[in-house]
Amino acid sequence: MRLGIISALAEEQQGLIDAMPDATRLTHGMREYTSGTLWHTDAVAVLSRIGKVAAAMTAATLVEKFGVTHIIFTGVAGSADFGVRVGDVVVAESLVQHDMDASPLFPRFEVPLTGLSQLPTDRELSRQLANAARRFLENEPGGAKLHCGLIGSGDQFINDGVRLAALKDALPELLAVEMEGAAVAQVCFELNVPFAVIRTISDNANEDAATDFMHFVKTVASRYAFGILRNFCHG
Ligand code: ADE
């Protein structure tokens, strides 16, 4: 396995790069790719930057130029469900591009010419990642929970309860919203690369989202990404 690890935020990636004793760096397409051994796993870590195109570009480059065989995306997300709270972790079973709408040519949410509106993640990789997250959360104070299910991605930071409610009406099983995962899902589906997405909830996608997001990213995000990936690589 050669594992591509995509993070959206520098805070999440820093600890990982520090844990690669043999790190080598290469800049390509405005991104820095760091290759090395991460707790005995051959890995390449990179910051995607923000949004679906940025994430798709990064995932395709990891596969085509860096030869990764598996991809994990780590990041934060807004909650889209009352049962999913700030500090909880969501592992995607499938992802939807919630701003995709080519109707009436194709049904709303369907990615044209794939026949899919919900893109499934790799079951085994997601199972291993969920186990790693569960073990991490067991040692965290505060009783944070792990959820597995549908994550929605769109080129919008959602900070509006009304907008979120409208989205939830159309996708009742939605657990969280972010801006990259479903783009990585489409690239991995088309290139036949197993992938998984894990997100820590930083905010409730409502009017307080921006403030909550900034606070969470500064204080908590890096510890989660580091702790969960260390458990994952140790098996
Ligand atoms: N990532 C973290 N919080 C988010 C939100 N509220 N909307 C979109 N992406 C996010």
Image: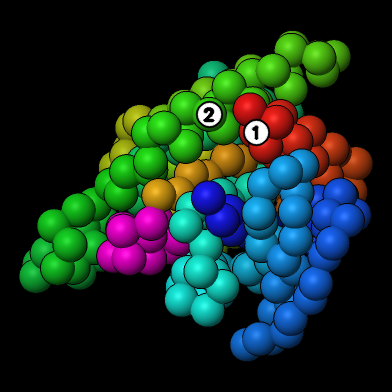
Number of marks? 2
Q: Residue 141 in the image: x percent, y percent?
A: 85, 14
Secondary structure at badge 2 equals helix
The numbered mark at residue 16 is none
How packed mark 2 is, by other alpha carbons closer than 10 Å (few <14, some 14-19, many 20 or more), is: some
Residue 232: assigned label? 1
Q: What is the magenta range?
A: 183-193
Residue corresponding to mark 2: 128
Where residue 59 appears, x then y in whole percent? 50, 67
The structure's colour scheme is: rainbow
**Residue sitting nearer the eye, 170 or 6:** 6
Name above or below for residue 161 compared with residue 20: above
> Can residue 14 be seen?
no
Q: Which is more toward the observer, 121 or 118?
A: 121
The amino acid at mark 1 is Phe
Q: Magenta region, mostly helix, strand or loop?
A: helix
- Residue under the image location 75 percent in, 61 percent down: 36
Badge 1 or badge 2: first in the primary sequence: 2
Decide which of 98, 6 is in the foreground and name it: 6
- Estimate the x, y position of residue 10 in percent, counting from the top left: 81, 61
Residue drawn at x 37%, y 33% is 123
Q: Is residue 1 above or below residue 226?
A: below
On the rendered structure, is 42 left or right of 196? Answer: right
x 63%, y 68%: residue: 48
Q: Are marks 1 and 2 in contact (CB under 8 Å)?
A: yes
25 over 12 or under it: above or below: below
- Given residues 32 and 220, the one toward you in this image is 32
